[in-house]
Amino acid sequence: MNKARNTFAALLAMAALGGCAGGNWQDAGPLYRCEHGIEFRAKFIDDTALLEGPGGRDLLQRDAGGEGPRQTVYSNPRMRAEFGLGASGREAVLRYPLLPLVARCVRD
């Protein structure tokens, strides 16, 4: 049952990350690998973060939050992404409040 739940959560997360279809997600920005089988690349431009994965892309706006200068937070109505976490600053967290689902990630 737990494996089926994790698979379902991964499918929901991929659908949530796939806001718009298109683009070659493997060519843009650093790669993040997350729990639940989620992978995405992030491109940071001004006060936005473009997250691209196999299911498409999501554009997030800079948000309040973060504990220090290297931690940044971006969000849109469907998700919230926190970057610059962990001792090395290579960790991130994706939060999907509507699912609800939280995925911890590490930048390659």
Image (cartoon, rainbow, N blue to C red):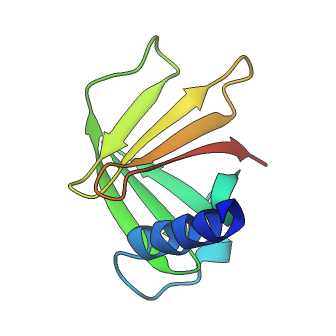
Name of the residue lying farthest toward the left: 77
Image coordinates for residue 59, horizontal then vertical, percent: 33, 61
Q: Quadrant of residue 28?
A: bottom right
Placement of the N terminus among the 4 image quadrants: bottom right
User: Residue 52 location in percent, x, y?
Assistant: 51, 69
Furthest residue in direction bottom, as rendered: 22
Quarter of the image for residue 3 reads bottom right
Q: Seen from this angle, which residue lies furthest front?
A: 1
Number of callouts: 0
Vertical position of residue 89 compared to residue 42: above or below: above
Q: Is residue 11 above or below residue 71?
A: below
Q: Residue at x 30, y 46 (%)?
A: 75
Question: Which residue is painted at 43% across and 29% down in the image?
Answer: 72
Residue 87 visible, this orientation = yes
Q: Closest to the observer: 10 or 93?
A: 10
Q: Is residue 54 above or below residue 32?
A: below
Task: Judge from the rendering whether residue 51 lies leftward or rightward of residue 39; answer left or right.
Answer: left
Residue lying farthest to the right in this orientation:
108
Vertical comparison of 9 with 56: above or below: above
On screen, residue 24 versus residue 51, left or right, reads: right
x%, y% of residue 74?
34, 42
Left-right relation of 71 to 98? right
Q: Position of residue 96 (x, y in %)?
A: 38, 52
The answer to whether residue 28 is seen in the rendering is no
Residue drawn at x 49%, y 23% is 71
Q: What residue lies at 31% left-to-right and 49% top-to-bottom?
A: 97
